[in-house]
Amino acid sequence: MVHKIALVGIGKIAIDQHIPAITNNPNLELSATVSRNASVDGVDSYATLDEMLEARPDIKVVSLAIPPQPRFDYAVKALKAGRHLMLEKPPGQSLAECYALEKLAIEKNVTLFATWHSRYAVSIPATKEWLSSRTIKRFQITWKEDVRRWHPGQEWVWSPGGLGVFDPGINALSIMTEILPFAVHLNAATLEFPSNRDTPIAAKLSFTNADRANVEAVFDWRQEGPQTWDIDVETDQGDLKISSGGAKMSIDGNVRIDGSDHEYANLYTQMDGLLQAHKSDFDLSPMIHVCDAFALGKRTTVAPFHF
Ligand code: NAP
């Protein structure tokens, strides 16, 4: 069965990833877009979600590729209209919003998918398997990138709810929560806020658990030159390294996986599977860590940020 999808928000990630991923999936059809500014050749276009929901009862699936701040209102409209729903990460701008969406999806008996695209990077399943039978001594996340390069002119990342450096950092936490064979919780954090912004430009996080796990993360948006999306894990049986956000994996310095990016193709395959099975996938663990960092983090003020 081919599922008709309406894609909402024709911005950077929709154009780079969602449209090709939907178009290349034989079980899915991009049947409409909802955009205040853009359209896609050959696809029905609506200026508002209300108009699309009213005009196209045949479209049963809505995918939201908009920033987190407006997402809840759009999600509620789609769910109340009985549509299956796929959410870009993060699934909301607060945990309470996310729980409200989960409850509404259950009431409406529709599929809800909180996507974490980084979990679908090529090395993640093998890394998870390798770590599952080892004792982890140290787990270090280093996620350092240039915000001017990846978020040019995007004011929403600097506004409350936009998460600042946690917008990419939550991707690392989505990998961490997928591959770590045990649960951890945040016990300390420092957050650096530019003096003219409402969200952090850098953060350091420490996690622990009842067995004193040694898990740390460093996020920084001021990295120029080479970009770093690495996780280094020391174990009792060798050292594992994930780099390029999960595209590469090496063990004791020997490259084991070096693949290409199919994260969004895999996300839409997962959505298709959830629709077929009439299930939801709504893991909030990466979001819980980010919310804890905002609750527990010691705040410092750093130089103002200008694009
Ligand atoms: P973006 O280009 O700044 O915005 C996406 C689109 O959302 C805009 O083009 C606009 O669509 C719509 N939009 C923006 N503000 C809105 C508002 N206040 N109300 C309603 N619609 C609004 O952002 P993006 O980079 O694509 O990111 C969108 C989401 O994808 C974020 O949650 C982000 O974390 C996630 N994501 C982004 C990337 C990336 O590389 N950029 C990667 C992975 C995940 P219209 O003009 O069509 O209405």
Image: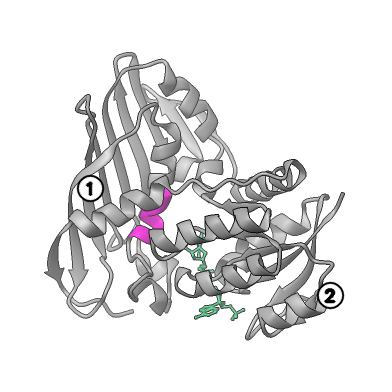
| Secondary structure of the residue carrying numbered label 2 | loop
Q: Amino acid at mark 1?
A: Leu
In-front residue for pair 114/217? 114
Find residue 52 and report its horizontal and vertical position in percent: 74, 78
User: Can the viewer see residue 30 in this picture?
Assistant: yes
Circle 2 residue = 42
Find the magenta span and give its range. Answer: 166-172
Image point (73%, 48%), residue name = 275
Quarter of the rendering occupied by the C terminus: bottom left
Which residue is at the front of the view, 75 or 169? 75
Q: Is residue 227 visible?
A: no
Q: Position of 291 compared to 268: left or right?
A: left
Asked whether 170 falls inside the magenta stretch, the response is: yes
How many numbered marks, from 0 up? 2
Real-space Cα separation, disc 1 to disc 2, in angstroms? 46 Å
Taking the image as shown, residue 248 lies to the left or right of residue 27, namely left
Quick check: 183 above or below 284? above
Please tell me whether residue 190 is drawn above or below residue 206 in the rendered image.
below
Q: Position of residue 206 (x, y in %)?
A: 21, 42
Q: Please report contact status of discs 1 and 2: CB closer than 8 Å, yes or no.
A: no
What amino acid is found at the position of numbered circle 2 in the picture? Gly
Q: Residue at x 43, y 74 (%)?
A: 152
What percent of the width, then of the height, locates residue 169?
36, 53
Q: Which callout, 1 or 2, points at the residue further toward the start of the chain?
A: 2
40 lies left or right of 258: right
Please name the residue that numbered disc 1 is placed on: 205
User: Which numbered mark, 1 or 2, is in the foreground of this view?
Assistant: 1
